Image (cartoon, helix red, strand yellow):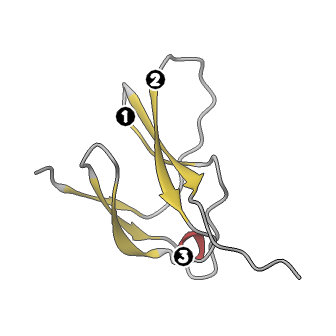
């Protein structure tokens, strides 16, 4: 099991390196919960400690390494159509 990675701010990426993109699926409600623990599909564990009121946009990077970009993905959700 890997160590807990604390995320206190979102990274800005402006390079052209080839990196593996790892999607972390989240519902719209999950993307508003910015103080919690979550696990990526590859087993990496993160502790979100973002400022209150932050919202995680779909496609935004959460954490970046030399070879990987962990990013927010939209999870399937039930919706009510009226």
Above or below 28: residue 1: above
Residue 53 location in percent, x, y?
64, 80
In the image as oriented, which residue stretches furthest toward the front? 82
Residue at label 2? 19
- Residue at coordinates 65% horizontally, 53% vertically from top-left? 58
Task: Answer whether labels 2 and 1 touch (C-beta < 8 Å).
Answer: yes
Q: Is residue 54 above or below residue 15?
A: below
Q: Secondary structure at mark 3?
A: loop
> With 5 as the anchor, is 61 left or right in this view?
right
- For label 3, the crowd category at 10 Å Cα-Cα, with few meaning under 14, some 14 to 19 and many 20 or more, is few
Task: Name the image quarter holding the C terminus.
Answer: bottom right
Alpha carbon of mark 2 to alpha carbon of mark 1: how far? 8 Å
Please report the residue visible at 37 percent of the width from the left and 25 percent of the height from the top.
67
Query: Badge 2: few (under 14), some or many (20 or more) residues near its Cα, within 10 Å?
Result: few
Quarter of the figure with residue 56:
bottom right
The residue at the point 63 percent across, 29 percent down is 14
Badge 1 marks a residue whose secondary structure is: loop
Q: Label for residue 65?
A: 1
Residue carrying label 3 = 51
Q: Against 77, is 33 above or below?
A: below
Kindly identify the residue that appears in the image at 57 percent across and 51 percent down: 73
Q: Position of residue 81 (x, y in %)?
A: 83, 77
Q: Looking at the image, is mark 2 or mark 1 earlier in the sequence?
A: 2
């Amino acid at each position: 099991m890997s160590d807990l990675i604390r995320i206190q701010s979102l990274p800005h990426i402006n390079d052209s390196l080839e990196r593996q993109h790892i999607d972390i699926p989240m519902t719209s409600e999950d993307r508003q919960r910015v103080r919690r623990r979550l696990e990526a599909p590859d087993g990496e564990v993160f502790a979100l400690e973002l400022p209150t009121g932050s919202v995680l946009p779909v496609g935004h990077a959460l954490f970046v390494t030399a070879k990987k970009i962990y990013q927010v993905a939209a999870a399937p959700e039930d919706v009510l159509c009226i």
